[in-house]
Amino acid sequence: MARYEFGAGLADYVVTPSDGLWAVGAGANVTVWDAAEGGTQYTDLQDAGGTPMTSVRADEYGGLPRFFGPDEVTGMWADAGGLARAWIAAHNLPTSGGTDESSTDWLNIRDDFGAVGDGVTDDAPAIQAAIDAASEAGGGTLYIPAGRYILQAALTWASNVNALGAGDRVSILQAMDQNLDLITGTDIGNVTLQGLQLSGPGRGYGSAVRFTRFSAPSTPNITLRDVLIQSMGGDGVFCHQLASSVLHRVRVRSCGGIGFHLQAPQDTVLGGASTSLVGCSAEGCVVAGFWLDGMSYTSLSACAAQGSPTGYRLDTCTGVSLAGCGAEQCTTGLTVYGGKGATVNGFVSEASDGTSVWVTNAAAGVVLVGVTEVAPVAAATACLRTDAGTIATVIGLTAVEANSLSGTVTRMDPGDGSVVLAGRTVVPSGGTAARMGTAVLVAGQVTVNTTAIAANSNVLLTTQTPGGTVGAPYVHARTPGTSFTIKSTSASDTSTVGWRILDPS
């Protein structure tokens, strides 16, 4: 009876959903079953060497190694202890009408196409042959075993072709021509690249991944996951009209252009949209860390930029959000250049030597929540800068450098209970916890009842309407949480005095 081979494929990342993706934890113990729920566990398994086993352990990257299932079983439900099981299919199913085995969706670039991965041989022709073969079959998955694969030519990718490596530290595609991209494709979609390192020659202008659109409406369903990109002369990732796509745990280091460059010109109907970047980082990129040009309905979560002139730039984007992201050692941490509906929640700019956040070019509907500036260097000029013509709402800003605010700015961050609405400061002035009001002196004295008064509060006093023999009002006494007394230097002062409570930070 035939035993069919499983594992080492892109479908073999099962159970617990993480950020919208299916994933297995490193070293997870995976059992296989004959049903999505309940059922009977298959325990008659063999590893790649034929040794019996009852379950499969994921490697340090969360991938399943090669293994053989029970006799005549071509598909199983995999379970790693999460909320659901996932279906995995055998890679070597029998051909139609016969018993011979043939690979249908999984191609090994070494075993099947002669790639070497010795760091010397030019493996570009072999890998290109694998891509072309998968494309001609209507799609498939290339397995790239551990090794350094030298590329003297760019790889031209195709739709519905995926690539899986053994990990971003061991499966390395090494570009040698400084003037060529490493992976390129036009009008393609439905591509996943995972567990790979894409390295360049450290100079020139080639990008690691360059997917462009010519006649297709977009570049859809692209997934980059657990990929390390470094030493490219151009951009780390350049994608044109990217749509319905995910970049998950992609790290770009020391590239001569932009770490993540997502471009969607506004002259097309669809544009780039519905894309998420999760846990991505850009370190030491010469132009910028993240540059989104014309993108819509796109999110960045838990991303980091370090050591670039611009950490993040949202250029004429619509409905783009940053959540829990940061920029370190960038001249400008975040630039919102035009567009509308940008939302920033929990953004940290550390060691900026310019402006931490800059809103400009008539950007509208910008919402900044929990923006924090940390330890700007001596050359820094501003924490938050908003230019004329912009519209922004700011909540909970923590600034070290002074702000430079123009345009329309609604602020709820001064820390004294006040709100700045379109340039006007509004302070609670009624009720038992009023922080501002007026009081009329009687024989040079009046008691103001408010629970907002504290032992260390600063109370600002001004004479609003003179009366009687006017003197100088001052705070004579206070009862924290209850009241304070205003007294004048003139016992016959009957003026109306305005007061405002400020608390030290």
Image (cartoon, grey):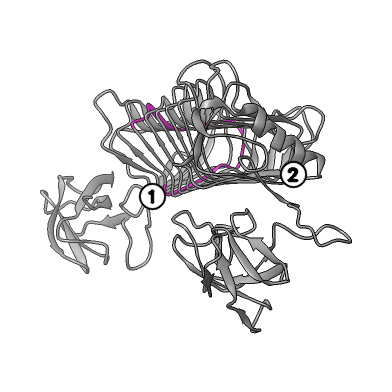
The kind of residue on which mark 2 rests is: Asn
Q: Is residue 438 left or right of residue 9?
A: left
The amino acid type of the residue labelled 1 equals: Gly
Residue 1 placement (x, y as % from top left): 73, 71
* Residue assigned mark 1: 396
Segment tinted magenta in the rendering:
329-346
Residue 206 within the segment the image draws in magenta: no
Nearest the viewer among 473 and 392 is 392
Q: Could you tell me which residue is drawn at 68 percent across and 78 percent down?
A: 34
Q: Which mark is residue 160?
A: 2
Spot occupied by residue 184 in the image (x, y as percentages of width and height): 66, 28
Whole-percent x, y for residue 108 in the image: 64, 45
Disc 2 or 1, which lies upstream in sequence? 2
Determine the residue positioned at 10% across, 48% down: 489
Location of residue 202 (image quadrant): top left
Decide if residue 298 is in sight here: no
Asked if one can make out residue 267 in the rendered structure from this viewpoint, the answer is: yes
Which residue is located at x 76 percent, y 60 percent?
A: 93
Q: Is residue 78 above or below residue 236?
A: below
Q: Nearer the viewer, residue 406 or 290?
A: 290
